[in-house]
Every structure is written in C-alpha cells, then in structure tokens.
Amino acid sequence: MELRLGWLADVLGDSPTLKLSGQAKELLAKGEPVINLTAGEPDFDTPEPIKEAAHRAIDEGGNGYTASAGIPALRQAVATHYSAKMGVTIEPAEVIISNGAKQILFNALSMLLNQGDEVAVPVPYWVTYPAQIAALRARMTPVVPSQPGWKITPEDLERAGAGRAKALILNTPSNPSGAVYTRSELEALADYFRMTSFFILTDEIYEDLVYTDAGHVPLMTVAPDLRHRIVTVSGLSKSYAMTGWRVGFGIADRSTIGAMNRLQSHSTSNVNTVAQKASLAAFGCGAKVAEMARAFRLRRDVLVESLSGIDGVSFTVPDGAFYLLADVRGLIDPDRGSGGDWRLAEHLLAAQKLATVPGEPFGVPGHLRLSYAIHEDTLREAAERFRAGVATFGG
C-alpha cells in the first residue's frame, strides 16, 4: 500500500523569504560577493544586558520546564511595559509568551477559526499569513488599498466584504511595505470594526522601528473598548535584535489567552527557559533600541536617495520596519506574462550578485522587497548594483 502524506504537505510551500535568504547565504559561504537584501532580521548584536542575563540564568540553574504561558516574572514585565505603552491596564493573565510572533499568530488563529472561516488580510501581507490561514483550512480575503501608501481604509474593507470575516490581520508597521498607520487612520478603522463582530489580530512586531514624529500607535490605545476582540502580536525579535532567541508575546483577554495556552501546552510547551529569563533584561534596553532605530532611519534615507530617479522604478518611502517595497512594473514586459518580479530577482542575483525578494508572495506581483538591515555603505553599493542590473534586464 502506498503511504501518502496528509493534505497539508501539499498545501504549504517553503517561506520564500527564508528560502531566498538561505540561497544568498549559501553563495556567500562559497565566496561569492553577494549583497543580501532579503534579510528579515537586524544585523546588530543582541544588547549586552540581555546576553549577560542569559549567562546568569545558565550559571544560576533552575532551567527546567516553566509554565507553558511563560514565567510569571516575564508575563508581569510584558504587562507592565504595555500598560504604560498602550495607556490601558494589562494583567499578566492577559499575556502569553510563545516561540516568536509566528507562534502567537498561529495559536490565536487556531483558537479563533473554524474550517471555512474567512480572514481579511490587507495587501501587501507578510508571506506567513496566507500559509497559516491555509493550514487551518480557512480562507483568506485580500483587502486591496485604493490609495497610495499601502494602507487600507474602511471603504476598502467594505468593498472587499470584510464584514463577513471571522478575523482580520492588521500589520503596522508593515512587512513588506514599511507602512505605519496614524492615530486618525486607526480611529477610522476602529469605527468600522465596531460595526462588525470579527477579531482583530494586530501584528506590531516592528513597533519600535518607526521614523515619524508621532511614532507607533497601538490599536489598543485607539480602541480600548474593543480589547475583548483584539489580539496584539509582538515580541523581541526585531527591535531588540533577538531573532534567534525566539521570544514573542501576545496580549488579549483572559479567555483568548487561556485558549492559546491550552494549544501551546500540547504543542511546544514553554519557550526556552534561559531565553525567557534573559528577556527580563530587555525592557531596560530602551536606549539601545532607540539607537538601532536611528541607524535604521539613516539607512532608509540612504537607500531612498540612492534608488531615486531610476526609470521604471517607484516606491513609497517607508515610515517603519526596515523594508522598501519597490514597484518595478515599469521594467516588466507584459507580453511575457506573469512572474516578471521573479525574473528580475533572478537576473539581479545572477548578473549583479544582489539578492532581493519578489513581491508576488506578498500579494503584490511586479514589486521587489528590499531590506535595509545592512550598513549604509553596503546599501550604496547595493543601489549601484540595482541600477546596473535593471539597465540590462530584458523584462
């Protein structure tokens, strides 16, 4: 009898960002002079107080299993930090610690969705959203922004029929566009949310990397009356340069957190104990986070200046995260059909040793995502390679 894998093995593909980043790293390991603009992680080292706390945690022992939802001290630290940040009182029982923001999202969607439910997702979207939705046998409803800048409006939600969805995922700052919703934009969306009954998963993992004077505005701050329907997703990976530590956290009402914890207790159980204890030091590293944010803003400005004026290429200046989403449809020959962004990415890698990510997996074919999580001198060289590469691209 032939043994076959389950249906999910055919549904899920590799993460294109991780796959392309892996290919770039393989070429670098072979000595190829590749500049990698696929990276979804900071190039900074984890702040010293966090590393020192990890050493202490190892030396002091007591690193067995913890409560599945996280050690009490870390849940309290998250609750305290976000109570101040959001302007609402968060209790430790409304916090769960998981293996990165991905697990928070998956746990939450698993507990909120039934088979066949719809999830409204603004375009462009992080590549993991549709994969997780498909894994849960739910359906994704793309919400396409009607205005420049990659941010949806209540009218866009209405046009997409989002009111029938069971949940909506809102990502601010956005991966891949770097778009950041303002307070007034969130207030307008909240008015629409109040006319619906769906849950809102607000992915705010890049919250500390915002380059506007107003900074990041949490949805919970704008709409505390909707807190029973909001799941805030964040963590330490991006702002604290702790991608490999795998510490994410979710904030929601007690019943939702309790359900997420039941799933976690039967799947992965607790996050690495040493990483949890080390993370207690993170909330005292605000000055270091601000320093990294200033560096990313400088890099953004360097990349924007270096890419300006290329025929056939346009973009909206990102206000947050560390990505620029370049519209390259002006370079693509429509007679060659779809896949132009993939062809361009392959051409840049082969001809210029420049690794980028096509926009198609993010829901925006004809675009490229460029990460500026590298030094500004390297970014200038990357821009020169980009200019040279697009000049020889055949569409």
Image: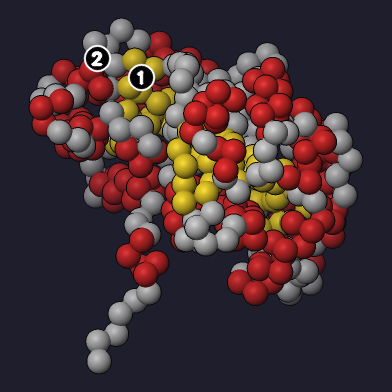
305 shown above or below 19: above
The residue singled out by tag 2 in the image is: 312
Say which residue appears at 59% left-offset and 38% top-offset.
Answer: 163
Q: Position of residue 81 (x, y in %)?
A: 82, 40
Say which residue appears at 52% left-offset and 49% top-offset.
Answer: 118
Q: At label 2, which amino acid type do we have?
A: Gly
The residue singled out by tag 1 in the image is: 380
Identify the colour scheme used.
secondary structure
Crowd rating for badge 1 (residues with CA inside 10 Å; few <14, some 14–19, many 20+) = some
Choose between 133 and 20: the one closer to the eye.
Answer: 133
Crowd rating for badge 2 (residues with CA inside 10 Å; few <14, some 14–19, many 20+) = few
271 shown above or below 62: above
Say which residue appears at 38% left-offset and 30% top-offset.
Answer: 370
Query: How far apart are the alpha carbons under marks 2 and 1?
Result: 19 Å
Choose between 2 and 155: the one closer to the eye.
Answer: 155
Q: Classify residue 124 as left or right of residue 10.
A: right
Give the position of the C terminus as an image quadrant. Answer: top left
Q: Classify residue 29 as left or right of residue 116.
A: left
Q: Classify residue 262 as left or right of residue 88.
A: left
Quarter of the rendering containing residue 213 = top right
Is residue 67 in view from this perspective?
yes
Quarter of the rendering containing residue 314 = top left
Choose between 98 and 64: the one closer to the eye.
Answer: 98
Give the position of the N terminus as an image quadrant. Answer: bottom left
Mark earlier in primary sequence (2, 1)? 2
- SS of the residue under disc 2: loop
Q: Residue furthest top?
A: 309
